[in-house]
Image (tube, helix red, strand yellow):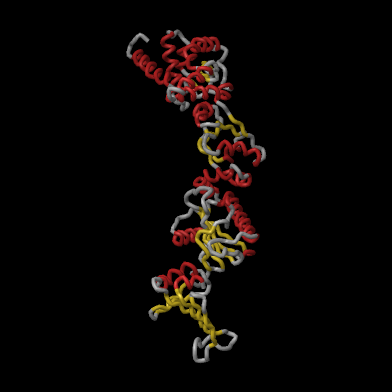
Amino acid sequence: MLSCFLVSDEIRVVTRSARGGPGVSWLGRSDGTYELRELPEDEGRSRPGTTVWLTARTGFEDHLRPATVRALIRRFAGRLEQPIVLRAAGNDEVIGGGPLPWVGRDDAALLAWSEEELGERFLDAVPLALPAAGLTGVALVLPESPSPAARQRHRVYLKRMLLSDAVDGLLPDWAFFVRAVVDTSALQPLASREGLYEDATLAAVREGLGAALRSWLTGLAERDPVRLQALVRVHALALKALAVHDDELLRLFAPWLPVETTLGRMTLSEVTRRGPVRYAATKEDFSQMAQVATAEGMCLVNAGYTYDEELLNRLPGVLAGVDVERVEPEDLAAVLGPVGSADAAAAAGLARRCAPVLSSFGCDVEVRDFSPTSLPCLYTAGDSARFTREVGETAQVAGSFWGPVLSMVEAAGGERREAVLVLNWRHPVVRQLAGPVTDDALRTALEVLYLQALLLGRHPLRGRETTLLSSALGRLVEGSLGGSH
């Protein structure tokens, strides 16, 4: 009635009961007055039924034109089982009627219908059915990942009449990656008819739909893992964001969440099957260790991406038999093989000669035997050394007040030797440096190797190291052209 008064100042209802008796006329006005009277036999409807007459208010004529009425019927009442006849200009048009469009369709047909109906191409379709709540429908997997905090937009029909296209609270929060279209006879609308009333029935429906989605995901993992991987690939970051705080979600999605490793991109289930899960906490640490770990056959996970380290550390709590270990660059350097006894003296002598060259950069030199042979050296830095480097980089761009202060902090940490340049004895250049090489040639070669190791490890060069790059490369070029070095 309120909707009628939005477009009309007067509503007339003429009705005749199927149980017999005279017809009745009710005339209501927007000022609150009304008239009610019985109709004589020759007035009103000749058959049982009801007719409602609306006269358009001035300025609202467009709302009652056939094209507008047709669009409104299709939108709000087009799913009713009882067809509606629109009679205009002497023509009858039947709208609606028949079964709900998602009942009895396979996945391909559901996706085709949803694209036509909602104007969006979805990744997958999940049939939904909760007979106890008189609910049927479909959950559609979104083609792009929304924010987990984004408001859900589900289309809900109540007894086949459209309630809204933007109902939230129908599905659990973790099911943010799907949009549902459902019809139900059990849920109650808000007075504004913009959403659903939060009660025990809605809570039970929400739980039941969540269980249906979990069952579908579990079944998909068994019968068609490629489809599940496609879903996770699109929504990986958002799924990780929720799984960080939800053990149930982590247990559900952990086997399929992708991570970067030294053996390529893998799922967590593939990583855990290889034994203890070892990871680098930052992208810089991963870059330092990747080549050596790959050569040694170690599956090292790059946990420098958002949420990855937190997820890895929570795995032992939700998956039985999983061990997780953080690996530091210095840990990897510590397990590199020593130089064989036949060459130990030459390697030790090379380390002694090299140590003074890099002492001003807060870096020690060691000689080890490791793979790959193509890698001449490896730079490793502990937390203290990385902190000192970061302070030095900041001091270079700081103002006149903070620059000297940060330089003092850097100098105070200069004696800590957690940074190490590990030379690979298997590399021919390193072996050549252990021979009869002049001090100048040794210094130039070692400086170039040091700079190469920094760049391979993605460490930004500090001011002195940038200067060293020009100087060392200049001397190297000069030597190659027959100079004195």
State the residue at coordinates (51%, 83%). 14
State the residue at coordinates (57%, 40%). 268
Tally of numbered discs: 0
Q: Nearer the viewer, residue 49 or 79?
A: 49
Give above or below for 12 relative to 138: below
Residue 103 seen in the current view: no
In x, y percent, where is residue 98? 51, 71
In x, y percent, where is residue 393? 45, 24
Which residue extends farthest left? 481
Residue 89 seen in the current view: yes
Which residue extends farthest right? 320
In x, y percent, where is residue 151? 52, 53
In x, y percent, where is residue 150? 51, 50
State the residue at coordinates (62%, 39%). 315
Give above or below for 406 relative to 40: above
Give above or below for 302 relative to 23: above
Q: Which of 162 and 208 is in front in this view?
A: 162
Give above or below for 436 relative to 147: above
Q: Quadrant of the C terminus?
A: top left
